Amino acid sequence: MIERFRPDPEFSPLRRSLAWSAHLYTALGLVLAAGMGVCIVRGGADDFRRAFALMLIACLIDATDGTLARRLRVKEMLPHFDGAKLDDLIDFLTFTSLPLALIWRAELLPTATEWVLVFALLASGYGFCQIPTKTTDGYFVGFPSYWNIVAFYLYVLPIPGWIAASLIFALALLTFVPSYYMYPSRGAMLSRLTNFLGGVWVVLLVWILWSLGVKDRSPDPSAPAQDYSLTLVSLFYPVYYMIVSWGISIERWKRTHAPRKQK
């Protein structure tokens, strides 16, 4: 017999409504995912830029909804609703399956190497389902399926197809390596610095997307070729993130495997 849920009388209807609003905020990611899907299917240059803009908004929601949920104590207010499961469902769409679909739709890889997208999809499925996929002290375990970022740089930069395919394959392999990647909104090491740099990076991404739109709408066919300098500058954040994360991983491995001193 299913036990009927009785809300704690300590929690007022207003507080429970606020808790539901936090879940609704998270659920906006589903609406954004639907918009991404439409843009990817249409497949024009403007559509791809809109898809990336929606991915960026989804990232911002994902970076802030957990803090909001903890502030509103949603687990206590609504114990029979699993917000983490909703969050994972949205993340798999907006971070993994739709960005990988965009890489395929935009023909960013040679046809003979497109199988790596399936490998990346399956690797991410493993990553999302492993226990633990996140540590209690604020780290992802294994490459955290940032395929939206990979798709953006493959789209914006003139990267040869075989290099792009090799990069996707290598990152997918890292999903199976027990390495640690920063989760700044959960208080990982250097979280304040990482969040600040992340804010600067987001501003750069918005600028890049806007610049792409202006360039593509230019009526002058003799306009100079696209300047990639701003995009190259924006790579500072992914490079910083990977270097620091791997530095943390190596340090944790050393502590784990260090021989214990005899008393």
Image (spheres, rainbow, N blue to C red):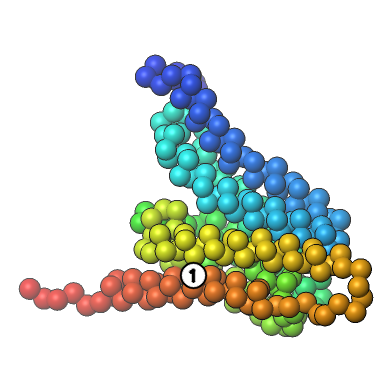
Establish if 38 lies above or below 182.
above
Question: Is the residue marked by circle 1 packed among few (<14), some (14-19), or many (20+) residues within 10 Å?
Answer: some
Establish if 72 lies above or below 12.
below
Q: How many marks?
A: 1
Establish if 79 lies above or below 109.
above
**Can residue 135 be seen by looking at this rendering?**
no
Q: Find residue 107 and report its horizontal and vertical position in percent.
A: 81, 71
- Which of the two residues, 131 or 13, is positioned nearer the viewer here? 13
Left or right: where 140 falls relative to 220? left
Q: Residue at x 66, y 73 (%)?
A: 231
Q: Amino acid at mark 1?
A: Tyr
Establish if 240 lies above or below 22.
below
Q: Residue at x 40, y 75 (%)?
A: 247
Q: Residue at x 59, y 61 (%)?
A: 202
**Can residue 54 be seen by looking at this rendering?**
yes
- Which of the two residues, 146 or 211, is positioned nearer the viewer here? 211
Q: Find residue 154 and report its horizontal and vertical position in percent.
A: 70, 73
Q: Find residue 123 and report its horizontal and vertical position in percent.
A: 60, 65
Residue reaching furthest to the left = 263
Q: Which secondary structure lies at badge 1?
A: helix
Q: Residue at x 50, y 28 (%)?
A: 18
- State which quadrant residue 229 falls in: bottom right
The quadrant of the image that shows the C terminus is bottom left
In this figure, which residue is indicated by the disc labeled 1? Answer: 241
Q: Find residue 29 and report its horizontal and vertical position in percent.
A: 64, 45
- Which of the two residues, 8 or 204, is positioned nearer the viewer here? 204
Left or right: where 19 falls relative to 202? left
